[in-house]
Image (cartoon, grey):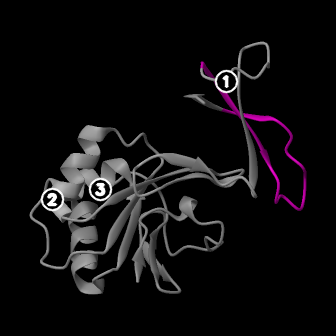
Amino acid sequence: VVVDPHPMSSPSAPLGFWSRRRWHKEGGTLKRTVPGMDRGEMEGLRSTFEALTPDIVVAPRSVLVELACRPLPPHRPAALISYGEPLHDRHRRCVERAFGVPVFDRYCVREAGNVALACAQGNLHVASPFVRVEVVSDAGVNVPGETGRVVLTPLLTLTAPLLRLAVGDVAIW
């Protein structure tokens, strides 16, 4: 069982939802219809987490940190996957200390899916068969080793090609 509080992390998110702020089950994954959680929803997630005893939890960094700051249920997943926000070392340490399991980072973009996945050492590696990644200057020139804008060309889009899509992120590569 995988718990994922945000459907945007899955390209197979259902088209119809019960309401704007409800949880639903899709296959073996618990998903939420909109990002952002209030205190009651965090308690609901904790209760659901306790009931489902998931093997893997996939959630934005802020949700993992929030869960780590609360009393945890006795069940511990095998791994946690963070996405949607930068996973800094201080966040990683906090969450790993609370859960006692590794946290893996995932860089994904709605238009391209998974762009980069973290290895056991915590380094992000581009999922190269699926997307071409460039880090470019304002002039659109590749800038290896320097800070630049992330430009993606997803290679699996079947309906309309997206060529050199500037996603608004900044990186060094």
Amino acid at pointer 3: Leu
Q: Earlier in the sequence, mark 3 or mark 2?
A: 3
The answer for how far apart the CA atoms under marks 2 and 1 are is 37 Å
Q: Quadrant of residue 139?
A: top right
In the rendered image, which residue does mark 3 sit on?
A: 64
Left or right of residue 38: residue 68: left
The answer for how far apart the CA atoms under marks 3 and 2 are is 10 Å
Q: CB under 8 Å between callouts 1 and 3?
A: no
Magenta-tinted stretch: 146-167
Tell which tag, 3 or 2, sits nearer the viewer: 2
The image shows residue 173, relative to residue 78, as above or below, that is above
Farthest-out residue, top:
139
Left or right of residue 140: residue 12: left
The residue lying toward the viewer, choosing from 2 and 42, is: 2
The residue lying toward the viewer, choosing from 61 and 144, is: 144
In percent of width and height, residue 14 lies at: 62, 74
Which quarter of the figure is the C terminus placed in?
top right
Packing grade of label 1 (10 A; few <14, some 14-19, many >=20) is few
Q: Residue at x 56, y 59 (%)?
A: 8
Q: Is residue 150 magenta?
A: yes
Tell which tag, 2 or 1, sits nearer the viewer: 1
Packing grade of label 2 (10 A; few <14, some 14-19, many >=20) is some
Q: Is residue 89 magenta?
A: no
Tag on residue 144? 1
Amino acid at pointer 2: Ala
In percent of width and height, residue 49 lies at: 27, 76
Q: CB under 8 Å between callouts 2 and 1?
A: no
Question: Mark 2 falls on what kind of element?
Answer: helix
In the rendered image, which residue does mark 2 sit on?
A: 98
Amino acid at pointer 1: Pro
Question: Mark 3 falls on what kind of element?
Answer: helix
Number of marks in the rendered image: 3
